[in-house]
Image: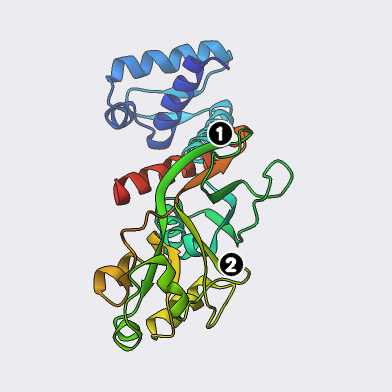
Amino acid sequence: MHHKTLERLFMFAEVARSLSFSKAAKALGISKGHLSAQVKVLEQELDVPLLLRTTRTVRLTLEGEKVLATSQRIKLMTGELERGLNTLDGNIRLTAPKLFAQTYLVDVMRQFRSIHPTVKFELNTSYTPHDLNYVNFDMAFRATDSSPPENMVSKKLLDYTQVVVASPGYLQKHGTPLDLESLHEHNCLPAHESTVWSFDNANIKVNCAISSNDNIVLKELALKSEGIVRLPSYFLDSEIKQGTLVPLLTNQAAKRSSLYLLYPTATRESSRLSAFTSFVSDYFKSNLG
C-alpha cells in the first residue's frame, strides 16, 4: 500500500471517529477543504463510497465501517512497530571480574535499566577468560596487562595498578615497610597461589598470614588490621580517600593494567547490545574522564 494511501486512511479515520470534517480537520491541523479532497481521493482509490454526506451530517457507509476498522488495526500495528523500534528489550548476558562488577557494573546495569526497564541482565562474575565465540555471553569485561584479543571488538574503559595498602592500626602496631625487601617482615594477605607480588623491577615472595580467593575478604581483613594487601586501585579508591587504608611503597612502580569491554563483531548488529556498549563507554568517560 502506497504511503499516501496510508495517510488518507488515517485522515478518513479521524473523520469517521468524529463524524465531522470540521472537527477532524482541526484535530489533524489541516484545512477542511484539503481533508475533504483527500477522503474523496481515497474513495476513488478504493472504488467504494465511505461516507454519506449531507449539509448537516456525516455518516459511515457499510464499506466505510469496514475501512475504519482496517485503518484502526493498521494504526495500532504502526504504533507497535514504532514502539518496538524505540524500546529496547531482551536479555544481555555479561561476564566480568567480581571486583569490577561490585565496584562499577552494579551501577552501570542499574542506570541502564532506569532508561530501558524492559532490558534484563544475566551477570556471571568470573576471572575465566571466556572465548565469546564459543560461550553463551554477549559481552565480557576483562582486565589485562597486554593487548586485548584481536578477534574481538575492544573498548578500553579504565587503567589501573595493583596498590599495596594496610590500615593505620596495622602500621601503628607493626611499622611501615619502606622497601620491597621489608615486606618479608610483615603479615601479607595474598590471593591463593599468588604469594609472589610482581613489581616493575622485582618479584617479591611474601609471607602469607591469611590467603583467600576472594579479594573482598582480603580487603576486609586489611581493614581489620590483619595484614598488608595488594589489590586493584579502583577497588581501594574510597578507602584510601577516607584514610581507612594507607598506600605503601608508592615509590615502587607497579605494573599497569587495563580493563576492556569485549564483544564479537556481530554484537553491533543488535540495537539492544549496541545501545549498551555506547552507554558503558559514556558512563566511564563521565565518571573517570
Residue 111: name its quadrant: bottom left
Question: In the rendered image of this protein, does residue 252 appear above or below residue 144?
Answer: below
Question: Looking at the image, which residue is at 46% across and 24% down?
Answer: 52
Question: In the rendered image of this protein, does residue 73 appear above or below residue 175?
Answer: above
Residue 123, x across and y down, in percent: 58, 59
Q: Which residue is mark 1?
A: 268
Residue 23: name its quadrant: top left
Question: Looking at the image, which residue is at 60% across and 38% down?
Answer: 149
Structural crowding at the residue carrying mark 2, measured as other residues with C-alpha within 10 Å and reported as few (<14), some (14–19) or many (≥20): some
Residue 16, x across and y down, in percent: 44, 32
Question: Looking at the image, which residue is at 53% across and 30% down?
Answer: 71
Structural crowding at the residue carrying mark 1, measured as other residues with C-alpha within 10 Å and reported as few (<14), some (14–19) or many (≥20): some
Residue 164, x across and y down, in percent: 39, 67
Q: Is residue 87 visible?
A: no
Question: Looking at the image, which residue is at 35% across and 19% down?
Answer: 35
Q: Which residue is mark 2?
A: 194
Q: Nearer the viewer, mark 2 or mark 1?
A: 2
The mark that comes first in sequence, 2 or 1, is 2
Q: Residue 184, which numbered label?
A: none
Image quarter where the N terminus lies is top right
The residue nearer to you, when weighing 65 against 286, is: 286
